[in-house]
Every structure is written in structure tokens, then in C-alpha cells.
Amino acid sequence: MKLQNKIAVVTGGNSGIGLAAAHEFKAQGARVVIIGRNAEAVARAAGEIGGDTVGITADVSRVADLDRAFGQIREQLGRVDVLFANAGIAKFLPFGEVTEEFFLEQTAINVKGAYFAAQKALPLLPDGAAIIFTSSTVAHFGMPGSSVYSMTKAALINLAKTLAVELAGRKIRVNVVSPGPITTPIFSKMGLSAAAAGELGGAILAQVPLGRFGEAGEIAKAVAYLASSDAAFVTGTELLVDGGMAQA
Ligand code: NAD
């Protein structure tokens, strides 16, 4: 129960890694708020996490939505001890086929969404609070077709370093978790045929030294560590949870 009486907010908390983290935070004693953009999915997940979990529907790529979401959190709960800025999408295209729309959609959700979630949470963060961003192992190597996605994830690593230093005066810790390939619904949202998805999965698997995909719960444990006082002297760093993929 390392997060007893903490208030933990998870963006993208209704699915995959965010949902697993929400369960872990709850199991460790936190009051959990999940933010997602699909009202039905958010309500279902909040019910599944259980207890007094709060579900808020908001599109993190819209700053006005984030203003409303954190306004609601301020009124209902008054503060945010842990922000897990995790919402993200993954889409892949060859460099020459990337359009402005494709570029802007991913940067708006993965970078702008995480950036302004942290900024809107800031007035609610007490001294000693923790922010964790979800980057990815792909921030560390070149993967064909991932020019936009990998760039968005690399951006979050520097955002964490910068905020770690800028917010250190308030003892706010800012860190990154970088998952390797994790079995979540993200792969089914890529618009790939079953055959192409299978091929992608096989190609990824071949690059993981530990020889398997990870589970969302394995990322959740790492995030809970970064959120807890066990990581009290850890800030501005990245925890790779990727089966060794970035080192291969
Ligand atoms: P997922 O699709 O299961 O979950 C993504 C979550 O983000 C969902 O809850 C979705 O509703 C939310 N989301 C997406 N766009 C949003 C928006 N505009 N506003 C609000 N919420 C939005 O996928 P996941 O695998 O759990 O991904 C979570 C994070 O982990 C992402 O940032 C992803 O890039 C990152 N990641 C995933 C993997 C992997 O292999 N699954 C690997 C590395 C990094």
C-alpha cells in the first residue's frame, strides 16, 4: 500500500497500460481518476477498477478539454499527487507518405496532450508529487515507418528531464517509463490487416532479447515504483521496461 491516500490521475486510463496502472494504483491504496476520450469505455473501466474511481471523458489533444478535466478534479478532489500522462496513439507510415494530418494527429495526442496534461495538473500538484510520462523503447533506435511516432516519444524524454529540473524546487519528481512491445489494444487500432499485424508482431518479437511481448501489468509495476516514495531520489530519468529491446 505504497500509495495510501494518494490521488492518482491516469490519462488513457481506460485501456491497456493506463488501465493496468490504474488497477495497480488502486491496489496500492490510491484514489484513482481515469481520463479517456470514449465516454462509454471510461465509464466501463472506472466501474471495473471499482470503489470510488472517477472517470472523466476528455480528448487530451484539446487544451480546453484538459482545462475542464482538471477543473473537475480540483473541485472534486482538490489535488493530484500522481499524474501518469500516458494517453497515446501509434501509427506508422513510410516517411514519404506522411501527411500533415497524420503528423499533427500523433503530435497533438502524444506530445501536446502529455505536455498540457502536466501543465494543467501543475496547480494541483503538492510538493513531492510525481509525474510520469509514457515514452517508448523506440525513442532509442531507428524503426522504419515510425518517424512521427518515435519522434513524439523521444520528445517526452526531454520534457521529463526539463521539468524535473524546473520543478525540483517544489520537490516534484518527473520521470518516464519506456515500454517495449506490450500486449494491449494499441496494435488493433493501427488500421493493419490481420496478416500485416501478424507480420509486424513477428518482426518486433525477433528484436526482443527476452523473447516475448511484455504485459501491461509489468509496466504498471514500474510506474507505481516511480510514483511512490521508493523513488524519492529518482527524477529526470527513464525506466526502460522493454525486455532489453533498446540494447539489442
Ligand atoms: P491503448 O490503445 O490500449 O491505450 C491508449 C489509451 O490512450 C486509451 O485509453 C485511449 O483512449 C487513450 N487515448 C488515445 N488518444 C486519446 C486522446 N486524444 N484523448 C484521451 N485519451 C486518448 O494502448 P497502450 O498500449 O496501453 O498505450 C498506452 C501508452 O503506451 C501510449 O502512449 C503508447 O504510445 C505507449 N506505448 C505502448 C506500447 C505497446 O507496445 N503497447 C509500447 C511503448 C509505448
Image (cartoon, rainbow, N blue to C red):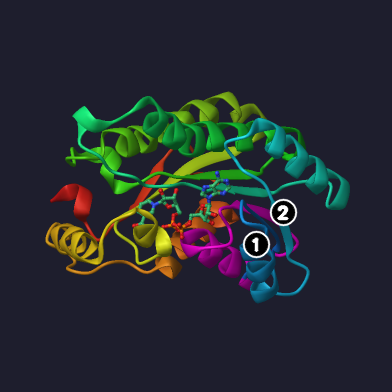
Inspect the image, locate mark 2, and give the three-letter code of the amino acid beneath it. Answer: Ile
For disc 2, the marked residue is 56
Query: In the figure, is residue 154 to the left or right of 119?
Result: left
Image point (20%, 54%), residue name: 245
Task: Provide residue 45's location: percent of width, then percent of height.
Answer: 63, 68
Query: In the figure, is residue 88 to the left or right of 10?
Result: left
Residue bounds of the magenta highlight: 1-27
Say if residue 100 shows up in the picture: yes
Task: Provide residue 158's location: percent of width, then percent of height.
Answer: 41, 29
User: Residue 153's quadrant in the figure?
Assistant: top left
Image point (20%, 28%), residue name: 96
Disc ID at residue 96: none
Against 235, residue 16 (above or below) is: below
Which of pointers 2 and 1 lies earlier in the amino acid sequence? Answer: 1
For disc 1, the marked residue is 42
Inspect the image, locate mark 1, and give the three-letter code of the amino acid beneath it. Answer: Val
User: Is the CB of mark 1 within 8 Å of ligand 1?
Assistant: yes
User: Residue 62's quadrant in the figure?
Assistant: top right
